[in-house]
Amino acid sequence: MAFARSGPVRSEAARRSILQAAAELLAERGYESLAIEQIAARAGVGKQTIYRWWPSKGAILAECLLEGTMLDGRLDLPDTGDIRADLRDWLGRIFALLERPEGEGLLRALIAAAADNAEVGRRLRDSLSGSESVSGRLARAAGTAPNLTPVAPFEEIAEALIGAVLLRALSRTPVEPGDADRLLDAILGR
Amino acid sequence: MAFARSGPVRSEAARRSILQAAAELLAERGYESLAIEQIAARAGVGKQTIYRWWPSKGAILAECLLEGTMLDGRLDLPDTGDIRADLRDWLGRIFALLERPEGEGLLRALIAAAADNAEVGRRLRDSLSGSESVSGRLARAAGTAPNLTPVAPFEEIAEALIGAVLLRALSRTPVEPGDADRLLDAILGR
């Protein structure tokens, strides 16, 4: 992305303000009613500045995901060497997010953005687990859980785990004690 | 739902026209740009007729899901007594849907509707498998697959399976040969 018209320092500050404003407004209002005008107003830039750099609100949100402007490390998958404990910790933080209205709203808004914008869709899965993909972590843990045999379909197991979390947000299923453990039993075996 | 103002026969015809128009337009245009005006125009009714019966486009789509106006039996989970074969058949039809642009668009539009409207969200999961829930079918098949022990968390296994399908639609992952079998290996064990 080029920032030729204004100086690079000022452009970078504006770019960060825009990403921050977009992330905040998405969490507050959801995806459908999010408008470029609102993002511009909150970021203190003109609408044309935004349109010069991004073709759509979805494109801004895709960049937010890539840069960690949203979810900002809160959902990083830890690495203690114990895959079940690490996933339980990670799921616990996701479920805690789902139990707060603004957290559930943010996750549903991200799903709506992913449904509308291909780039957000491609990035959402990886953005939920931080720097390492869930499938990569599962593959490294091969042999440590009944379903994680050395030839297990790690990509599909990761899809099932992350997909279950997204479905939970979409179906408004309340989180109950033991849910994370039951989901891990389903995914890793007992 | 009461249809007091006009005769019941005429109201029922209008109601069905509205549901049909909403389902068609959702598939054609996606959720975000779907508008009550368009639904009214295609159904040949006034906008006020729609607003008298439903508070929002999401509410219309929730009723479409409940009545089977969308997906109309194409995704029914068969019951041959062989759970793996039944699920492979069902996943095969979902993946075939995802491979056609209009099918993928419809599924993503439904996900966007579910993100925005709680009732659509609650119904989407069950609507994908027809008359019997996936978890109910898994429970009936207890003992027939490595992960389907009699005390398996059937609800969570079903969530993982359906969630993986939704994530597939969101992440625009192309369907490859063997995908259904790998996902079934991940969910049912090998």
Image (tube, coloured by chain):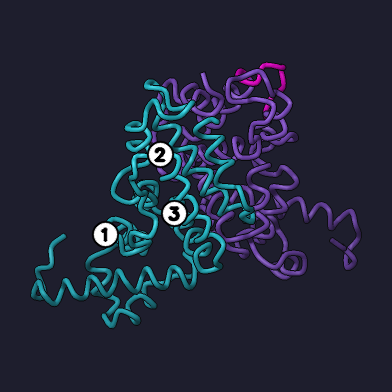
Chain colours: A purple, B cyan
Q: Chain of mark 1?
A: B
User: Does the magenta run of residues contain A84?
Assistant: yes
Mark 2, residues whose alpha carbon is within 10 Å: few (<14), some, or many (≥20)?
Answer: many
Amino acid type indicated by mark 1: Glu
| Rendering coords of residue A76 (x, y %) | 68, 31
Comes first in the chain, label 2 or label 3: 2
Q: Earlier in the sequence, mark 3 or mark 1?
A: 1
As helix, strand or loop, the secondary structure at mark 1 comes to helix
**Cβ atoms under marks 3 and 1 closer than 8 Å:** no
Residue at disc 3, secondary structure: helix
Q: Amino acid at mark 2?
A: Ile
Residue at image position (77%, 69%) is: A52
Label 2 sits on residue: B83
Is A28 in front, or is B71?
A: B71
Q: Which residue is mark 3?
A: B116
Q: CA distance from mark 2 to mark 3?
A: 33 Å
Q: How far from the left and from the top, in percent, is residue A121? A: 62, 53
Magenta-colored span = A77-85
> How much space separates mark 2 and mark 1, taking CA atoms?
26 Å
Q: Earlier in the sequence, mark 2 or mark 1?
A: 1
- Label 1 crowding class (10 Å Cα cut-off): few <14, some 14-19, many 20+? few
Q: Quadrant of residue A170?
A: top left
Look at mark 1 in the image and give the residue it sits on: B67
Chain for numbered disc 3: B
Out of A102 and A154, give the one closest to the viewer: A154
Is-magenta flag for residue B105? no
Mark 3 burial class by Cα count in 10 Å: few <14, some 14-19, many 20+: many
